[in-house]
Amino acid sequence: MRLLQVKPEIYKFDNIKSFSEFFNIGSGDLILTNEFLYTPFMKELNLTADFLLREKYGRGEPSDEMIDAIMKDVNPKDYKRIIAIGGGSIVDIAKLLVINNVTKTLDLFEKKIPIVKGKELIIVPTTCGTGSEVTNISIVEFKAKHTKMGLATDELFADYAILIPELVKVLPYKFFVTSSVDALIHAVESYVSPKSNTSTELFSIKAIELILNGYISIVKKGPEHRLEIIDDFLIGSNLAGIAFSNAGVGAVHALSYPLGGSYHVPHGEANYQFFTEVFKAYNIKNPNGKIKKINSILAEILCVPNDDNIYDELSKVLDTLLVRKPLREYGMKIEEIESFTDNVIEGQQRLLVNNYAHLDREEILTIYKKLY
Ligand SMILES: [Fe+2]
């Protein structure tokens, strides 16, 4: 049984200049990034690498049409490294560009062509939530099929994950909160996953400490304080990524996908709507298992004397950073309580197997009803 895998080598730099010097970035490299990052952080460095600015191919989450157009431009050139500097979308696209001989993204996801990695991949995340720099998954929307699909294969692991806190400082406050809440949930869900072990728990616990202590001091000192402690969030997100890459995430992610997909709620925000209710349900279902440990870890960080109402105490902190509102306010319809539940049971088994305690149809339905 494998306990832990961390594929990329992980580095931290103060700025892009030191990173590009250390890695000798230049000809033979393709940097995939956003214009709003290129102009302030890369333009004046006069790097001889090629740049591909994602805005040229449209906005929104990555779709197969967008990636096919990028592949058409990139494939004829003989790059030795692909360097992603950006958020989740940039990273998801870059992971696919290292695979040889792809003309249609769908062929890759339907495994119609062999998956052979032909280039090195360097990932520089500019949000503090997805942990995607250390995972082997890429998620793409397939326009004609009206669905998102994920490809998880070890060829998609980066060779190097690079943490540069200065890049994350420009993340607007709302995106900072929604992305870091996602990281906190990665850490907590992976901690109680049946696939967790002592090694993955180390990563989960440290990530929880960094992120939650950071939130507590932001609540005290105000939103601008995040800029002083941004390292903690970037490292916390990275550690949480390692934990969930090995132990998986469960029902919180599973229940949030139908809401996020149907009503375009940001991933971290959608997760947060379900986070504390799922953990309250776990506590009722099996109060004496491993959840006791996570409850006391949270109680200690939150400085509350007992952990009986720990998820209400946790909500008090998180609610000051990110709003929870009834699901109907996102546009969800009452009949979707049933259809979302069915969608989760039928489509999210890969996540539900990571649940701390089994949640049956009725229990999932009850969570949706309660939050509706
Ligand atoms: Fe997530």
Image: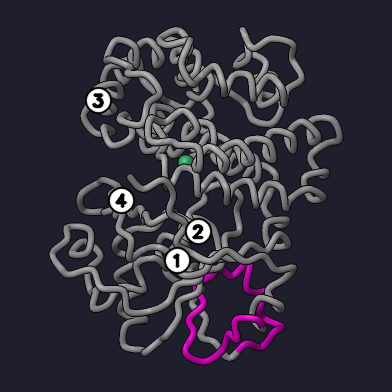
In percent of width and height, residue 143 lies at 26, 53
Check residue 345 in the rendering and tell me which mark sits there, or answer none.
Answer: 3
- Marks 4 and 2: which is nearer the front? 2
Q: What residue is drawn where x is 48% and y is 69%?
A: 54
Count the marks: how many?
Answer: 4
N-terminal label among 1 and 4: 4
Q: CA distance from mark 1 to mark 4?
A: 17 Å
The answer to whether 157 is drawn above or below residue 141 in the figure is below
Q: Provide the residue span drawn in magenta.
A: 22-47
N-terminal label among 4 and 3: 4
N-terminal label among 2 and 3: 2
Q: Is mark 2 within 8 Å of ligand 1?
A: no
Please say whether residue 366 is visible from this viewpoint: yes
In percent of width and height, residue 223 lies at 79, 40
Residue tagged 2: 133
Q: CA distance from mark 4 to mark 3?
A: 18 Å
Q: CA distance from mark 3 to mark 1?
A: 32 Å
Residue tagged 4: 150
Label 3 is placed on what type of residue?
A: Ile
Label 2 is placed on what type of residue?
A: Glu
In this view, the residue in front, 139 or 162, is 162
Residue tagged 1: 158
N-terminal label among 4 and 2: 2
Q: Residues within 10 Å of mark 3 (few under 14, many from 20)?
A: some
N-terminal label among 3 and 1: 1
> Is disc 4 placed on a helix, strand or loop?
strand
Q: Is mark 4 within 8 Å of ligand 1?
A: no
